[in-house]
Image: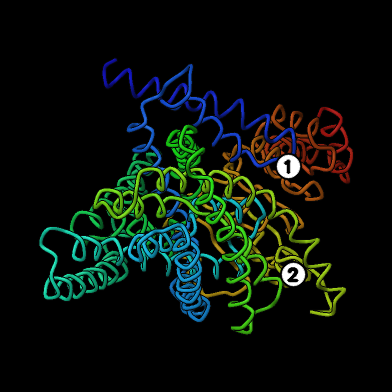
């Protein structure tokens, strides 16, 4: 099979089986991730039937990880990481604890100290893909708890990168004490340069490039530019700085996230990452060889015990010891009860140096599948766990992180205005005078910059297409009282359908030019208030006609006739 057909076959077979099993998993109240993992097993070389190309699937999965971390970076600010630095340091304590427990238990199986320690390090880090997916599904990713969890993962990733660089210095052909020290210094220096380059130089260059692309008005060019930035910086991070592509993508995302292009990049350029992230889970399933389970079951039991019990409980206790709320400690600790991509990378390198056997590597794959499956399910038990602890007196008030967000915004009077032309500006000014918060969604980047330059706290501006679901979510549509579509050129029907699906109580006011559009909008939403440009023209012309005859007080009658036509 040629490479071209191999790529198409892998994508088609992997995604088709993932779709079927993911749908079944969703129907039986399991996470779709479970279906994706099983799909990988079904199309793997170790199972009969369809066999996809594993190398192609893994490369597609790598793209998914890069795009996912780019998206996470866009929602994570540097000050957020600084604010959770204590929790991030807790990740190092958890790694040390997990590695120590694993090493002691593995020694009973007759392993060497070196092999046991490397295996412990491999399972001490959690999967970024799984955690972000779990937090996203539970609407916790862009909350203080989500930021703390991402900070924890970043610390784990940085630690793993250092280990990956130092392993060749320890066990490679040129290993020596001098080489070890020099390699360590060079690694730290490269990581420091990467961070400085991305956050300082990139902060100037990337927004400059995106602004010029955005001003062309070409949607495809904008999407392409975002993907080039995400993938390009990731590859440069790996090739020139010795860092992981995931870390490079995260830093690039942070730069874009601090610019005016964050919302549009998220809504238009990153949905493709969902497809590639599915392939990540499929590729994990493809690595599993069931024939090795018979000889590896004692090792598997130990690894499952450490990952499902030692890691979550240890992380929870560490976070609680750092004086964080119990609910946050449980949420983060539970989400860390799994292993993923960095575990595979570290274990694979250990196998290549003869530190670890292939059976042990396969055991890690199996444990990954089991823990990811359990983790996405167990996470739904958190409210019950917290309520149980509440009864025991750990804290008095129970509420979720999502409730915290709603409590912060429920007292704010909030209206979304789409378009900032003459009508939008007038409406916004009136609303602000009435002490109503306004979020403007606008596709002109210069207009967005002008709004932000006014530094009005009650007036926000988002650059993006209001017909995109992600853009409306970023405008806090869940808590908005109304949407005013002030421009007749906006796709009002699309916006209306999405808005109603996100907030069924929201009132939608539309400025439309044609009466036919008004009819369709009224049919779909009885609570919608529509003012048509044709109606205004008819009223103005009728006024002139009746003035000829000296007739007055006709506005109400004409308005009534026009509404009947609608």
Q: Quadrant of residue 162?
A: bottom left
Given contact means CB atoms under 8 Å apart, are the residues at marks 1 and 2 in contact? no
Above or below, 30 against 203 in this view is: above
Residues 539 and 72: in front is: 72
Q: Quadrant of residue 139?
A: bottom right
Mark 1: secondary structure: helix
Marks 1/2: CA–CA distance: 21 Å
Q: Quadrant of the N terminus?
A: top left
The residue under label 1 is: 501
Answer yes or no: is residue 130 visible. yes
How did the renderer colour the structure? rainbow
Residue 432 percent location from the top left of the image = 68, 69
Above or below, 9 against 278 in this view is: above
Residue 430 percent location from the top left of the image = 69, 65
Mark 2: secondary structure: loop
Residues 61 and 120: in front is: 120
Residues 557 and 331: in front is: 331
In the image: residue 23, left or right of residue 410: left
Of labels 1 and 2, the one closer to you: 1
Task: Work out whether mark 1 precedes mark 2 in sequence or the reverse, and give the earlier one.
Answer: 2
Q: Residues within 10 Å of mark 1 (few under 14, many from 20)?
A: few
Q: Quadrant of the C terminus?
A: top right
The residue under label 2 is: 412
The residue at 28%/64% (across/down) is 202
In the image: residue 488, left or right of residue 161: right
Residue 129 percent location from the top left of the image = 49, 51
Residues 2 and 313: in front is: 313
């Amino acid at each position: 099979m040629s490479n071209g057909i191999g790529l198409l076959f892998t994508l088609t077979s992997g995604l088709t089986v993932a779709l079927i099993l993911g749908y079944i998993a969703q129907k039986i109240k399991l996470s779709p991730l479970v279906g994706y993992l099983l799909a990988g097993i079904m199309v793997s070389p170790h199972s009969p039937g369809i066999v996809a190309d594993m190398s192609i699937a893994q490369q597609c999965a790598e793209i998914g990880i890069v795009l996912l971390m780019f998206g996470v970076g866009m929602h994570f600010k540097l000050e957020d990481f600084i604010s959770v630095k204590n929790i991030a340091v807790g990740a190092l304590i958890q790694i040390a604890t997990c590695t120590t427990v694993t090493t002691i238990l593995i020694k009973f199986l007759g392993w060497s100290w070196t092999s046991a320690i490397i295996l412990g390090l491999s399972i001490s880090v959690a999967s970024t893909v799984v955690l972000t997916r779990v937090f996203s599904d539970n609407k916790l990713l862009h909350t203080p708890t989500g930021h703390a969890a991402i900070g924890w993962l970043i610390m784990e990733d940085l630690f793993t990168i250092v280990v990956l660089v130092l392993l060749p210095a320890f066990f490679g052909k040129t290993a020596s004490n001098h080489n070890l020290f020099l390699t360590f210094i060079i690694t730290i220096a490269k990581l420091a340069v990467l961070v400085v380059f991305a956050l300082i130089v990139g902060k100037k260059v990337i927004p400059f490039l995106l602004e010029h692309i955005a001003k062309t008005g070409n949607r495809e060019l904008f999407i392409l530019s975002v993907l080039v930035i995400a993938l390009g910086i990731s590859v440069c991070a790996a090739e020139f700085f010795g860092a992981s592509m995931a870390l490079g993508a995260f830093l690039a995302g942070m730069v874009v996230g601090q610019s005016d292009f964050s919302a549009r990049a998220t809504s238009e350029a990153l949905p493709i990452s969902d497809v590639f992230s599915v392939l990540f889970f499929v590729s994990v399933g493809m690595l599993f060889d069931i024939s090795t389970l018979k000889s590896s079951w004692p090792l598997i039991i130990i690894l499952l015990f450490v990952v499902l019990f030692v890691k979550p409980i240890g992380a929870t206790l560490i976070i609680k010891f750092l004086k964080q709320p119990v609910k946050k400690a449980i949420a983060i600790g539970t989400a860390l009860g799994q292993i993923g991509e960095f575990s595979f990378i570290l274990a694979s390198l250990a196998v290549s140096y003869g530190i670890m056997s292939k059976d042990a590597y396969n055991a890690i794959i199996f444990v990954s599948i089991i823990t990811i499956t359990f983790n996405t399910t167990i996470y739904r038990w958190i409210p019950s766990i917290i309520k149980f602890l509440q009864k025991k007196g750990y804290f008095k008030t129970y509420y979720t992180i999502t409730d915290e967000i709603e409590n912060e915004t429920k007292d704010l009077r909030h209206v979304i205005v789409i378009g900032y032309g003459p009508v939008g500006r007038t409406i916004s000014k009136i609303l602000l005078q009435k002490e109503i918060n306004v979020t403007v969604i606008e596709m002109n980047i210069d207009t967005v910059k002008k709004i932000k330059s006014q530094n009005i706290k009650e007036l926000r501006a988002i650059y993006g297409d209001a017909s995109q679901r992600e853009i409306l979510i970023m405008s806090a549509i869940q808590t908005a009282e109304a949407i005013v579509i002030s421009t007749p050129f906006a796709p009002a029907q699309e916006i209306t359908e999405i808005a109603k699906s996100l907030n069924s109580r929201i009132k939608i006011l539309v400025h439309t030019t044609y009466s036919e559009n008004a009819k369709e909008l009224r049919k779909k939403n009885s609570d919608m208030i529509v003012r048509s440009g044709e109606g205004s023209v008819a009223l103005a012309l009728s006024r002139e006609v009746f003035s000829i005859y000296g007739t007055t007080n006709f506005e109400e009658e004409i308005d009534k006739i026009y509404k009947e036509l609608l």
